[in-house]
Image (cartoon, rainbow, N blue to C red):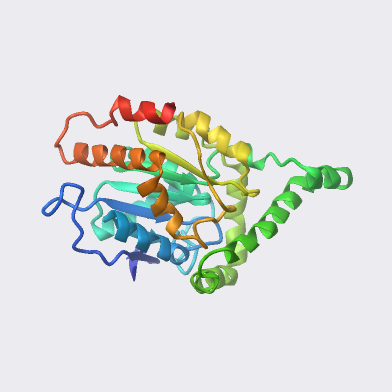
């Protein structure tokens, strides 16, 4: 990944682009590359996902962009204090325009999943497909259940959900150390985390916005527009619960791909995403749909929607 910055108005935006600048598209030499953008989660940054994006670029031949959303990981915040996921989606579009990206696969993790949905809703013709990973676009993840919730509810009912969420975050952290190279995971994670710690108070309103978020109508519109969606979830994720995975699955009419790990499974095991797309039937079918969409954007076929036969594979 090659780091870079751009200026939008007076805001500095940090991002990186995969170094495969001579990549060609699925139709071989002479065809334009297939692009992807990897959108990070809350209190993260694009640098945390560099290893994963590098492997996607190497194994699938895609050009990959890792933006740092406004206010995160060294990117300047938006001027308005009333920030929405739509504002973040617009910021991603600015980066894609800056690097000259064509129609794009959007990977969104956690908060980034909600941004991915907003981006596709605003311009479904630009988005080839969404890889939605442990996302917070729908509200079910806020419905906290379990022993800890029951115990805290007896003492302070209004704080039970927040306490359970904080405990889930703490319990998810050890998963970052379970991988082939835990030292490399820490080296990739800490720089963006440190940048976020310096501005932690300014990120609180964004957390509050996420806790109010309900994009169920947006998700349904995106699915109805024919944008392929591949839901992926860490099977031990307690931050964004399996109930949220089931909710998203119902809305997009696609089964969830369950991945070993917690909420941020892709950080300690960056090869996982490429493995899903290369080896798993659901991942390969998603790539086929994306390539179909890519050819439609180039005018090689008339129908911009994925073939019904491919969609039926997911529905089944």
Question: Total of numbered circles in the picture?
Answer: 0
- Residue 40, x across and y down, in percent: 47, 57
Q: Quadrant of the C terminus?
A: top left
Residue 310 percent across, percent down from the top left: 33, 30
* Res. 313 image quadrant: top left
Observer-nearest residue: 156 or 237?
237
The vertical placement of 43 against 149, above or below, is below
The picture places residue 76, in percent across and down from the top left corner, at 45, 66
- Up-down: is 311 above or below 125? above
Please name whichever residue, 70 or 168, is drawn nearer the observer in this view of the structure.
168
| 123 versus 237 height, above or below | above
Q: Residue at 46% of width from left, 32% of height from top?
A: 254
Residue 210, given in percent of the width and then of the height, sits at 58, 47
Question: Which residue is located at x 57 percent, y 34 percent?
Answer: 246
Query: Residue 225: in sight, yes or no?
Result: no
- Which residue is at a point 88% across and 47% down the rendered structure image? 155
Question: Which residue is drawn at the image coordinates 37% and 36% (left, top)?
Answer: 228
Pick the quarter of the image with the N terminus.
Answer: bottom left
Q: Nearer the viewer, residue 299 or 280?
A: 280
* Left or right of 155 in this view: 8: left
Residue 249 showing in the rendered view: yes
Residue most extreme to the right: 155
């Amino acid at each position: 990944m090659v780091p870079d910055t751009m200026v939008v108005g007076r805001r500095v935006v940090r991002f990186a682009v995969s170094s495969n600048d001579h990549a060609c598209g699925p139709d071989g030499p002479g065809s334009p590359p297939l692009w992807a953008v990897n959108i990070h989660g809350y209190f993260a940054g694009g640098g945390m996902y560099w290893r994963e994006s590098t492997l996607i670029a190497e194994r699938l031949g895609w050009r990959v962009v890792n933006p740092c959303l406004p206010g995160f990981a060294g990117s300047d915040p938006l001027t308005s204090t009333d920030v929405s996921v739509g504002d973040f989606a617009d910021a991603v579009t600015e980066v894609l325009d800056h690097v000259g990206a064509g129609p794009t696969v959007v990977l969104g993790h956690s908060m980034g999943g909600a941004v991915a949905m907003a981006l596709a809703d605003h311009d479904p013709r630009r988005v080839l497909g969404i890889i939605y990973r442990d996302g917070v676009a729908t509200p079910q993840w806020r419905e906290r259940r379990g022993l800890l919730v029951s115990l805290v509810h007896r003492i302070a009912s209004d704080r039970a959900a927040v306490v359970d969420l904080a405990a889930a975050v703490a319990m998810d952290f050890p998963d970052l150390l379970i991988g082939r190279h835990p030292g490399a995971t820490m080296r990739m994670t800490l720089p963006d985390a440190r940048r976020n710690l310096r501005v932690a108070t300014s990120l609180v309103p964004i957390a509050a916005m996420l806790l109010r978020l309900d994009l169920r109508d947006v998700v349904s519109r995106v699915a109805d527009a024919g944008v392929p969606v591949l839901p992926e979830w860490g099977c031990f994720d307690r931050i964004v619960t399996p109930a949220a995975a089931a909710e998203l699955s119902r809305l997009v009419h696609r089964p969830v791909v369950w991945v070993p790990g917690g909420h941020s499974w892709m950080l300690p095991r960056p090869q996982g995403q490429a493995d899903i797309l290369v080896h798993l039937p659901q991942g390969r079918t998603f790539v086929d749909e994306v390539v179909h969409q890519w050819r439609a954007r180039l005018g090689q076929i008339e129908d911009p929607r994925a073939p019904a036969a491919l969609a039926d594979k997911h529905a089944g």
